Image: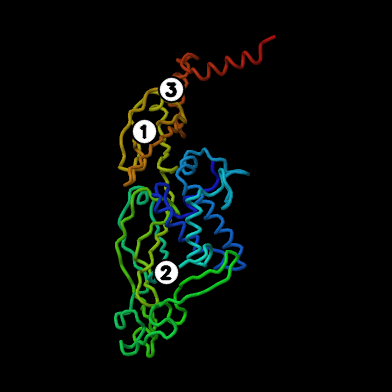
């Protein structure tokens, strides 16, 4: 069985679509790329781990095997090897993803390559939300308050006092892009990137906006109601696109708000995937004679008729009574019967129990009878 939770490494749910997995991978790979963290071994290991996770769950065939527990994760298994084939290597599609991403970001590959002109993107915000166990399995709506950078309403994000104090950048001629020529092992590399003098805006500020100090953004508190879907797990992340920080210069789109969930443990339930497990104490009389027991479930408590002669530790399965998600995943509820032996009984009650026991014979105790038979076979009398 797999020893690593690749979905958790990428920060997505097990039910995530291929596009959601790809988006999470590209974001993390850019974040931890060694070229951005020279000499940082922790970032290099994280980069390797992210690529290993994507090489498996980013491939439909490997993802299926991984989900079914059919993938060997030991030595020679699915470890990351961007140039290898077989179980651990990238597919052609997977390697194209990383090749395209880093050739754009760092100027690798190809003889001549032109970077696409992209608007600036603000940084992401991570927000911790604490949930009760029932909130996590049923879903809920919560108001949250957080601080974020928003475009300055006075200068509309330009950072200038007014339009008169914006001039065309003399380095890029107002295009926001400059041409770079680099000699690489692949030959001469020609790229077009953002102008370092104007930050890709094509404009130079001659007098800054007083409201934002020339930053183009201000800090504001934001209040939103968040709808949390049913079935989120502890440590899972929900992404709200465009609710993050505004870019600090020029026009562009906001980053994302990443909601990381911390789920409190339940005194009743234990969770495994979408299945729920609960232990129900029952009286000795109910276990022997049968009777009604109350069973907790996500949608409330229901009554179950326990048959007579139910043994301690016996597990009952209720299909479809586990966690239900908006995407159609449904789990089961597993109920373990715990027969509770009464304590502090009176002398009269003890006498009644002794009479009860004397009225029974081994035929009433099939497990004990089988046990004694095995003892007799193992230790025959001489």
- Residue contact at pointers 2 and 1, CB within 8 angstroms: no
Q: Quadrant of residue 73?
A: top right
Q: Is residue 255 left or right of residue 190?
A: left
Which residue has dot 1 on it?
318
Which quadrant of the rendered structure holds the C terminus? top right
Q: Is residue 40 left or right of residue 50?
A: right
Q: CA distance from mark 2 to mark 1?
A: 46 Å
Q: Residue at x 38, y 37 (%)?
A: 333
Residue 198: percent from left, percent from top: 42, 81
- Residue contact at pointers 2 and 3, CB within 8 angstroms: no
Q: CA distance from mark 2 to mark 3?
A: 74 Å
Residue 99: percent from left, percent from top: 51, 58
Determine whether 339 is above or below 73 in the image.
above
Residue at the far top: name it.
382
> Which residue occupies the foreground of this view, 320 or 205?
205
Whichever of labels 3 and 1 marks the residue nearer the N terminus, that label is 1
- Tell me the number on the disc at residue 352: 3
Determine whether 75 is above or below 33 in the image.
above
- Tell me the number on the disc at residue 299: none
Q: Residues within 10 Å of mark 1 (few under 14, many from 20)?
A: few
Q: Residue at x 35, y 51 (%)?
A: 135
Which residue has dot 2 on it?
123
Figure colour scheme: rainbow
Whichever of labels 2 and 1 marks the residue nearer the N terminus, that label is 2
> Which residue occupies the foreground of this view, 273 or 24?
24
Q: Quadrant of residue 199?
A: bottom left
Residue 57: percent from left, percent from top: 47, 48
Q: Residue at x 40, y 54 (%)?
A: 20
């Amino acid at each position: 069985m797999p020893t690593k939770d690749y979905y958790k490494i990428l920060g997505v749910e097990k039910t995530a679509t291929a596009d959601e997995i790809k988006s999470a991978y590209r974001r993390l790979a850019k974040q931890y790329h060694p070229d951005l963290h020279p000499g940082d071994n922790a970032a290099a290991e994280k980069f390797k781990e992210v690529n290993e996770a994507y090489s498996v769950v980013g491939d439909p065939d490997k993802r299926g095997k991984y989900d079914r527990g059919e993938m060997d994760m030991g030595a020679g298994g699915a470890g990351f090897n961007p140039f290898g084939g077989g179980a651990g290597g990238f597919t052609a599609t997977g390697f194209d993803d990383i090749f395209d991403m880093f050739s754009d970001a760092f100027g690798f590959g190809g003889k001549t390559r032109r970077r696409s002109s992209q608007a600036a993107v603000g940084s992401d915000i991570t927000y911790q939300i604490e949930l009760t166990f029932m909130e996590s399995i049923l879903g809920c709506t919560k108001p949250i308050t957080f601080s974020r950078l928003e475009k300055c309403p006075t200068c509309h994000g330009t950072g200038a006092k007014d339009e008169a104090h914006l001039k065309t950048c003399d380095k890029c001629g107002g295009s926001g892009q400059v041409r770079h020529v680099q000699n690489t092992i692949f030959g001469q590399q020609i790229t077009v990137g953002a102008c370092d003098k104007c930050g890709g805006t094509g404009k130079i500020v001659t007098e800054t906006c007083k409201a934002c100090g020339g930053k183009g953004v201000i800090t504001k508190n934001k209040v939103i109601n968040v709808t949390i879907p049913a079935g989120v797990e502890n440590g899972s992340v929900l992404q709200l696109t465009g609710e993050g920080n505004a870019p600090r210069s020029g026009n562009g789109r906001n980053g994302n708000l990443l909601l990381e969930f911390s789920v409190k443990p339940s005194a009743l339930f234990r969770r495994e995937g979408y299945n729920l497990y609960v232990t129900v104490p029952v009286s000795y009389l109910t276990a022997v004679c049968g009777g009604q027991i109350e069973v907790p479930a996500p949608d409330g408590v229901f009554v179950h008729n326990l048959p007579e002669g139910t043994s301690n530790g016996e597990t009952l399965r209720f299909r479809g009574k586990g966690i239900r998600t908006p995407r159609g995943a449904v789990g089961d509820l597993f109920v373990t019967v715990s027969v509770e032996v009464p304590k502090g009984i009176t002398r009269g009650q003890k006498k009644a129990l002794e009479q009860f026991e004397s009225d029974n014979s081994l035929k009433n105790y099939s497990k004990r009878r089988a046990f004694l038979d095995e003892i007799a076979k193992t230790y025959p009398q001489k």
